Image (tube, rainbow, N blue to C red):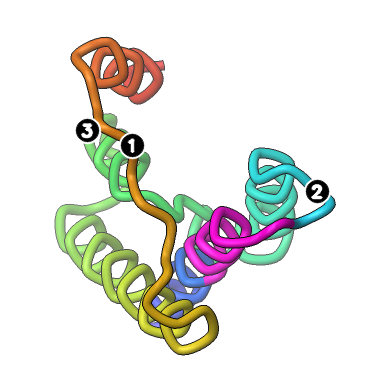
Amino acid sequence: MNKYLAELFGTFTLVLIVTLSLSGKFPIPTPILAALVLGTFVYTIGAISGAQINPAVTIGVWTIKKITTKDALVYIISQFAGALLALFVAVAIVGEKLPQMPHTTWVMGFGELIGTML
């Protein structure tokens, strides 16, 4: 149970920090904040859950059989729950003015695909 809660909390924190960073003016750029959060969770929950904090990473770890199918499914559910909880908290903090996603193009989609494969 601890590993699932660790994934939920890690995903919650990452989504909350990135969302709040994108919604306001912070002295630290969003990519640096995301890297600091990920680095922190690798050290804090890495030994508990592997600090995947992302369904794409979980699927990748599952495909190479480092985790069971049950663990992969519960990790992904925990990650989605953490992300949704973070969005609710961000809306409560910022209000309805959350950052808008830019219009996506096939180039952005291709970049995401390559990044996920790597």
**Residue at which label 3 appears:** 63
Q: Position of residue 68 (x, y in %)?
A: 22, 53
> Residue at left 43%, top 75%?
86
Q: Is residue 18 magenta?
A: yes
Q: Which mark is residue 102?
A: 1
Badge 1 density bin: few <14, some 14–19, many ≥20, Cα 10 Å: few
Q: Secondary structure at mark 3?
A: helix
Residue stretch rendered in magenta on the structure: 13-25
**Residue at which label 2 appears:** 28
Instruction: Kindly check if marks 1 and 3 are in contact, taking CB atoms under 8 A apart as contact.
Output: no
Q: Which mark is residue 65?
A: none
Q: Position of residue 104 (x, y in %)?
A: 24, 27
Secondary structure mostly seen in the magenta stretch: helix
Instruction: Kindly check if marks 2 and 3 are in contact, taking CB atoms under 8 A apart as contact.
Output: no
Horizontally, residue 112 falls left or right of residue 53, namely left
Q: Position of residue 60 (x, y in %)?
A: 30, 34
Where is residue 112, by image quadrant?
A: top left
Q: Secondary structure at mark 2?
A: loop
> Residue at left 52%, top 68%?
16
- Asked whether residue 2 is in view, the answer is no
Q: Secondary structure at mark 1?
A: loop
- Which circle's residue, 1 or 2, is located before the other in the chain? 2
